[in-house]
Image (cartoon, coloured by chain):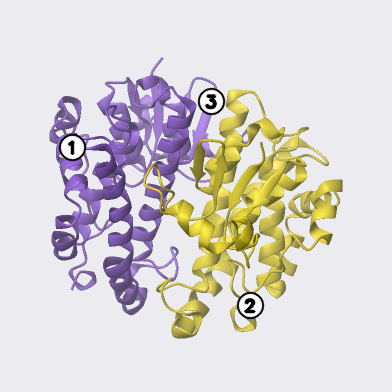
Chain colours: A yellow, B purple
Amino acid sequence: MAYELHYWPTIQGRGEFVRLALEDAGARYRDVARGSEVEGGGEAALMARMAKPARPPFAPPFLVDGDLVIGQTANILLHLGPLGLAPEDEADRLWINQIQLTIADLVFEAHETHHPISVAETYETQKPEARRRAEAFRRQRIPKFLAWFEAILKAQGDDAWLLGGQVSYADLSLFQVVEGLTYAFPNAMATIIAKAPAVAALADRVRVRPNIALYLASPRRTPFSEEGIFRHYPELDE
Amino acid sequence: MAYELHYWPTIQGRGEFVRLALEDAGARYRDVARGSEVEGGGEAALMARMAKPARPPFAPPFLVDGDLVIGQTANILLHLGPLGLAPEDEADRLWINQIQLTIADLVFEAHETHHPISVAETYETQKPEARRRAEAFRRQRIPKFLAWFEAILKAQGDDAWLLGGQVSYADLSLFQVVEGLTYAFPNAMATIIAKAPAVAALADRVRVRPNIALYLASPRRTPFSEEGIFRHYPELDE
């Protein structure tokens, strides 16, 4: 049976980390809110699913796998182990989950750069604060996170994945973060990524994986935009 | 062999979610950075452990269990399943992990109320922004999160844990969040918690669990303070 992915239909957002794993693995899935309402899709279907009382997710993305409804991006990826993108060894699984949760922290901080005060208000209402937060994020936080990924990769040797010889969903997520940060902060990232060559090389290797390359060239890959998590506001990248 | 918990010695912080699980289970553990340097403890021991190149944690807390070094709070708790505070069924494990990750999101947002601009600067440098962020957090975010926990508990019936009949580490974490939010925002929480009676009742039941009650009365329980995640600044609770 195909997986059902539930996420906002017009943005990459956190759903994209799940999409990349499903696409790379060639898994059958239905991107529910992107479907037509006559076929039981659309945002209405997502909202209806969220409103069911048994074990409701707090927010999208969530994945429906038979009777299971699973929320939280890192938790969905943990469940998708059978796709072949997670190690079988328990210590390795914990390590990849740890990396994924650290990527989630970085994604959270990336979001806060344009919404440092309130998610319920628009970016325009919090621009001066966003400017200050983005500066701290560019100068201190991105370099700190990328240095950690770089150290992990360097300890593994040339052309390594985060786990060494075996690709995992965390590699796909790290690629997505590099893409997103480069979209949002092209000036800052030009300097930062030069100091993280192993991270840049990993992103390049993910980009040309056959199923990922097909996906990125397909209409299923929504472009980055100023509705998503990674937003390009030139004034936040000066 | 005893677990080694590594966390900053003078605050509860994220380490407290792990401590509560270890204490409730009566597990043997060493709180390394709180130990004396002559016995191989102290912050120096924490820093030395973090600096080891193989699979370094991004930040404390992290747990050392034999050869394993495990970072990220929710990941540590996932690993502590054998303590008897995690369900054995895979669907239940994913559900508790999902709840724990949502608690982590709430904790993150609680931290941002006093540091909306930069973690590298003091609260005093970002007070006006903190005031605005705290207002949005009190008015919209805490009620939204607590309503979700409340709905989960109500669906289970009276005196339920998050999983129904079986206590889990997520219940201990939810207790800690209620304690922390009540410390930080006593005015706001008086109103909010009145609308989440099942959450309040759960926190009360956790507080009197024998090992938790012993722990809370012991010197091992550090008081909340303005160095931790949950901080009481009266101007953020007006």
**Amino acid of disc 3:** Leu
Going from N to C along the chain, the mark reached first, 3 or 1, is 3
Residue found at x 41% / y 68%: B121
Front label number (2 vs 1) = 1
Residues marked 2 and 1, same chain: no
Provide the residue designation for mark 3.
Answer: B68
Quadrant in the rendering for residue B85: top left
Indicate left or right for A55 with A79 as reference: left
Report the disc number at residue A73: none
Label 1 resides on the chain identified as B
Locate the C terminus of chain B by quadrant: bottom left
Provide the residue designation for mark 1.
Answer: B158
Residue found at x 56% / y 45%: A63
**Amino acid of disc 1:** Asp
Residue furthest front as drawn? A38
Residue furthest top as drawn? B1
SS at mark 2 in the image: loop
Report the disc number at residue A237: 2
Label 3 resides on the chain identified as B
Evaluate whether residue A234 shows in this view: yes
SS at mark 1 in the image: loop
- The residue closer to the viewer here, A38 or A185, is A38
